[in-house]
Image (spheres, rainbow, N blue to C red):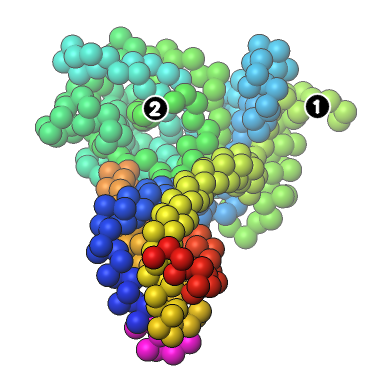
Amino acid sequence: MSIALLVDGWRNSCAAIAANPVRAALSMASVAIGVSLLVTIIGFVHAIRQGVGSDLGTSEALMFYVFREPLPDPQCSVDPAACPVNRNPALTLREADVLRSLNIVRKILLHASWTDSISADGDERNEVTVDAYGPDWLEATGNRITDGRDFTMVEHRLATPAVLLPAEIAERLFGNQRAVGRNVRFAGAVLRVIGVYRPATSPIGRFSSVGAGAHVVIPMEVARRRLAADLSSLNFVVKPIEDIDQLAATRLVSTRLRAVRRLGAGAAANFSIITQSQLLDLYEGVSTGFHVVIIVMGLSSLVVGGVGILTIMTITVTERTQEIGLRKALGATRPAILTQFLTEACLISAAGTSAGIATSAVILACVAIKYGLTGAVSPPVLAGGALFGTLVGGTFGFAPALRASSMSPLDALHHL
């Protein structure tokens, strides 16, 4: 295909679009909506997956978790009361002390969760999830403090009434005012805000938390001594010493817990040990189907835009039958006619795609700034969306263009 043929097709396509701006704009809008939805969805999926990898990459690979229950069971989600693992005895602080005595354990991080409501200065109460942690909780969650500080070991041991708020709750309670140094009330106690944190970008760091919504953080001893909280959800994050096999570490922890709980050799374990790789497998299993569904929805919307181009180009070819006949009678070749209409379809699709990509980039950038997502605005995702959107226009515009190029000059001239 010669350059002159492409230039001629470009010129004629631009003239045709300018002659019917409303029709072209509607086609562009349909493509823009489809591309924007698809690229935004893929951008979110990419950011979430990158966040999971980042959380696992920054945490210690050997770290594993000890829970009262095993990995989520679909049957237990349907009928929690009938789930046998709910009869498992809760983990205890004494068991944590026993595990700390193992020579392969470097650190045990404690965690328990429950739902409650929080308020400031008598304002409306907000439902939150309370996370009670031992010191060094940031190592297990991937969260980061953006204002103020973390609680110290001394504050933990003395049950100092301190709390850390997620940025979302701090803004909701105090607006534009600084939250650090202010008081909040929940569970009948008044706690002082010592820090504001930004949650981890992936669900790996929050896997062991229960409840929905924002998570406020308090020292474990505050929960136990000041709030008399129910610690039945207590779980451990075990950090083994370096250069030890993770399988050996989990086996030793399991053996010691079985001994403390006096479980015989043939008895089933009434606790669960879960590694980070198992968490990742769980996340992948749960999220893959959801990601596929939403991506298919995005593709469907883009196909709708492509069908719009097919419809518009079919109408265009029908309306310009006389023009096609005259051009063929004057010597225009089939490739020239095909190039003209195919270029017009691609131009409409490219313009709509550009608008959709720009819209997606703005949406993803705003969400990334607000929620701390990294990798949401991904150049490869944007470039792939631009290429795919343009190809959709060319694909759906090919049939009308082929029909136009296949017209007989005599048949076309009958419309004169």
> Does the image show residue 388?
no
Q: Residues within 10 Å of mark 1 (few under 14, many from 20)?
A: few
**Type of the residue with mark 2:** Gly
Towards the viewer: 70 or 97:
70
In the rendered structure, find residue 224 and report the number of the disc placed on it: none
Q: Position of residue 183 (x, y in %)?
A: 19, 22
Mostly what secondary structure, the magenta segment?
A: helix
- On screen, residue 413 versus residue 92, left or right, reads left
**Type of the residue with mark 1:** Ala
Q: Quadrant of residue 3?
A: bottom left
Where disc 2 sits, the SS reads: loop
Compared to 151, does 268 lie above or below? Answer: above
Q: Position of residue 71 (x, y in %)?
A: 66, 33
Residue 86 magenta-highlighted:
no
Residue underneath mark 2? 213
Residue at (86% x, 30% y) in the render: 265
Where disc 1 sits, the SS reads: loop
Compared to 65, does 73 lie above or below? Answer: above
Residue at (72% x, 42% y) in the render: 252
Q: Residues within 10 Å of mark 2 (few under 14, many from 20)?
A: few
Residue at (64% x, 46% y) in the render: 281
Residue at (29% x, 64% y) in the render: 17
Q: CA distance from mark 2 to mark 1?
A: 34 Å
Which quadrant holds the C terminus?
bottom left
Towards the viewer: 368 or 13:
13
Residue underneath mark 1? 268
Q: Residue furthest left?
A: 177
Q: Which residues are magenta?
A: 1-7
Nearer the camera: disc 2 or disc 1: 2
